[in-house]
Image (spheres, helix red, strand yellow):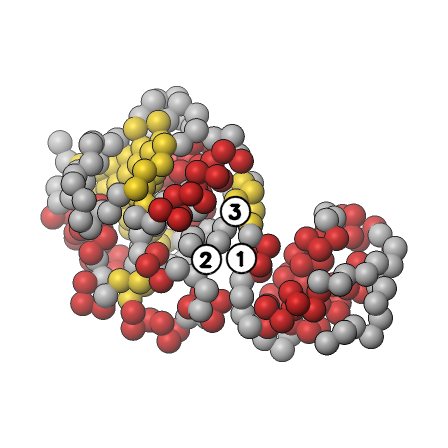
Amino acid sequence: MTPDLLLRTPRQWVHYTAERLRAAYEADEAEGIAWWVVEECLGCTRTELLLSRDERDLPSIDSILERLLRHEPVQYIFGRTTWRGLSLRVTPATLIPRPETAELVDQALTLYPADRPIRVLDACTGSGCIAIALKKERPCWQVDALDVSAEALTIAQANAEANQIAVRFFRHDLLGDAPLPDYDLIVSNPPYVRLSEQAEMTPQVLDYEPHAALFVPDNDALIFYRALAGLHAATLCVEINEAFGREVCEVFRQAGYADIQLIHDSYGKARIVTGRMAL
């Protein structure tokens, strides 16, 4: 649909975009996406948009709105997102980094002194966000990152280079490849959503994000946690499905971990489990 006015101020474009998006999004979400879209289309910051009264044309706005109304994530439309101060490229080969994963990074950073050189592995790295964030905060840490997806690893390597962060990425299947060398700390956001939970998911996630990075079988929901515990790192720090906090703790206990902690996120959901290998 062609806008009634071809020329609008940035605020008018935000209002137009938000109104169109309310057909598929809650009002607050529509407003947030609208600002993002107009900022990207005009190449301006939020402050610049608020101050500008110039009328401009946005010829691409309707094609973008059509994609958004089909629930395509705005991050995939523009091919990037900002997370923990990092500008990251994202594609349908990688999950979109989420706030709860930022809390996983926050927790991992507390597990060793900032000035102690350690070997760290980010397992199931996807976009590389965890590995890059850890290395940025702890330059003395040696950070490696693995994924089974070659396409995801290409994105992750590009993100590390764009942010000028040195991380070693490599392809590895946690469920089938040979054992890895020892690490002081393994951090991971592995697949943990049961296939039966698809009905509860939004179209933005279910229809667009990579299923291999999301789902596990209902009859073996802890498969990745057993694999991670079997690596016998000195310390584990993992993101979990809130429905399986106790079960993940038990997997770690049986693998020889002690000082196991189940940590709730800022929404009160069981989200992180940590453990240290018993001496």
Mark 2–mark 3 Cα distance, whole angstroms, equals: 11 Å
**The N terminus - image quarter:** bottom right
Crowdedness near tag 3: few (<14), some (14–19) or many (≥20) residues, C-alpha within 10 Å: many
Report helix, strand or loop for mark 1: helix
Seen from the viewer's position, the closer of residues 125 and 49 is: 125
55 relative to 118 in the view: left or right: right
Q: Which x, y percent locates residue 223?
A: 20, 56
**Circle 3 residue:** 89
Report helix, strand or loop for mark 3: strand
Q: Quadrant of residue 180?
A: top left
Crowdedness near tag 1: few (<14), some (14–19) or many (≥20) residues, C-alpha within 10 Å: some
Q: Which x, y percent locates residue 155?
A: 45, 44
Q: Which x, y percent locates residue 245?
A: 26, 57
Mark 1–mark 3 Cα distance, whole angstroms, equals: 9 Å
Seen from the viewer's position, the closer of residues 62 and 32 is: 62
**The C terminus - image quarter:** top left
15 relative to 102 in the view: left or right: right
Query: Which badge, 1 or 2, is on the more N-terminal residue?
Result: 1
User: Is residue 263 at all visible to an observer of this figure?
Assistant: no
Crowdedness near tag 2: few (<14), some (14–19) or many (≥20) residues, C-alpha within 10 Å: some
Residue 92's tag is: 2
Q: Amino acid at mark 3?
A: Arg
Q: Residue at x 49, y 33 (%)?
A: 161
